[in-house]
Image: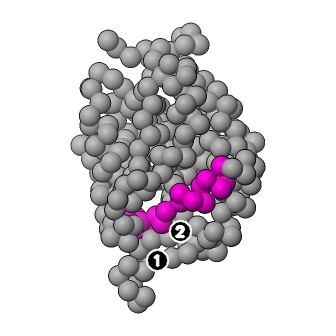
Amino acid sequence: MGENPGIQHFVLVHGACHGAWCWYKIVSLLRNKGHKVSAVDLAGAGIDPRDADSIFSFEEYNKPLIDLISTIPDDEKVILVGHSAGGLSLGYALHFFGKKISLAIYLTAMVHKGLPSDTKERFGDLWEFGYGLGPDKPPTSIMFLREKQREALYQLSPDEDSTLASMLLRPWPLGSMFNACYEGEHTEDIDKVTRVYIKTLKDNILKLEVQEEMIKCWPPTEVMTMDTDHSPFFSAPNELLCLLLRASAMYCRERSS
């Protein structure tokens, strides 16, 4: 296959507390290369109007992604890119659209087959918890503590991007994760989708050993590496663009007409 695999449709999925806005540099760079790009706001994120403390099902949380992929013609395969907790949404979409996805790229992301059972213990000091059902009930949302945001997420990113993020981050609907289910119409196709994992070596939130756990429990076709923080879409957008294009050139066929 040549270096140019043809026009591809990239669907970008954000992580916890973020929204489609975090991909603004990558959207522009990919479009300038002639590709189609869709960046989605999951439920309660970005400009989606729902309140994180009122979202209690994984199905509702991922509905914007499922609705988006459903509108794409069957002969137009997509490349899914998921960042951080967005990897969980990629796994969900793969169970419904395995035949429609030509490549899944996990960017320092969680995979549904390797979600740590001690998530709160690992990351609890970074979050503020919301209790929409009452203080005596399990937390329904989480939000990055403002004073920890730059250190945890953007320590190598431009200050203006970190500042932008601090204005746009929203609570993440933790309640939707408690009943996460990965069963869909095409469950048998999930392991047939080519997967690439991109590690970030200076990640202060999804530490390298955690990323290695994710890779080990569900080995991808290829592992790529970036010497960046948790948010390479801010800290190294051109390098990330190169890896996305490299992966698409290696593993995606030209879209059928």
In percent of the image, x 33 and y 30: which residue is there?
A: 100
Q: Amino acid at mark 1?
A: Gly
Spot occupied by residue 253 in the image (x, y as percentages of width and height)? 44, 17
Spot occupied by residue 98 in the image (x, y as percentages of width and height)? 34, 35
Q: Is residue 146 visible?
A: yes
Does residue 215 appear to the left or right of 99 in the view shown? right
Does residue 102 appear to the left or right of 212 in the view shown? left
In percent of the image, x 26 and y 34: which residue is there?
A: 71
Q: Is residue 122 visible?
A: no
Q: Residues within 10 Å of mark 2 (few under 14, many from 20)?
A: some
SS class, disc 1 = strand
Q: Which residues are magenta?
A: 161-181
Residue assigned mark 2: 143
Question: Exactly how many numbered labels are in the figure?
Answer: 2
Task: Give the quadrant of residue 67.
Answer: top left
Q: Is residue 75 above or below residue 56?
A: above
Colour convention = one colour
- Among all residues in the image, which is located at the extreme top? 2
In percent of the image, x 35 and y 59: which residue is there?
A: 49
Q: Nearer the viewer, residue 143 or 177?
A: 143
Spot occupied by residue 11 in the image (x, y as percentages of width and height)? 43, 36
In percent of the image, x 61 and y 30: which residue is there?
A: 241
- Asked if labels 2 and 1 touch by Cβ distance under 8 angstroms, the answer is yes
Q: Is residue 94 above or below residue 57?
A: above
Task: Give the quadrant of residue 186.
Answer: top left
Task: Answer with mark 1 or mark 2, whichever residue precedes in sequence.
Answer: 1
Q: Nearer the viewer, residue 124 or 147?
A: 147
Residue assigned mark 1: 130
Does residue 80 appear to the left or right of 257 in the view shown? right
Q: Amino acid at mark 2?
A: Met
**Is 25 covered by the magenta stretch?**
no
Q: Is residue 9 above or below residue 111?
A: above
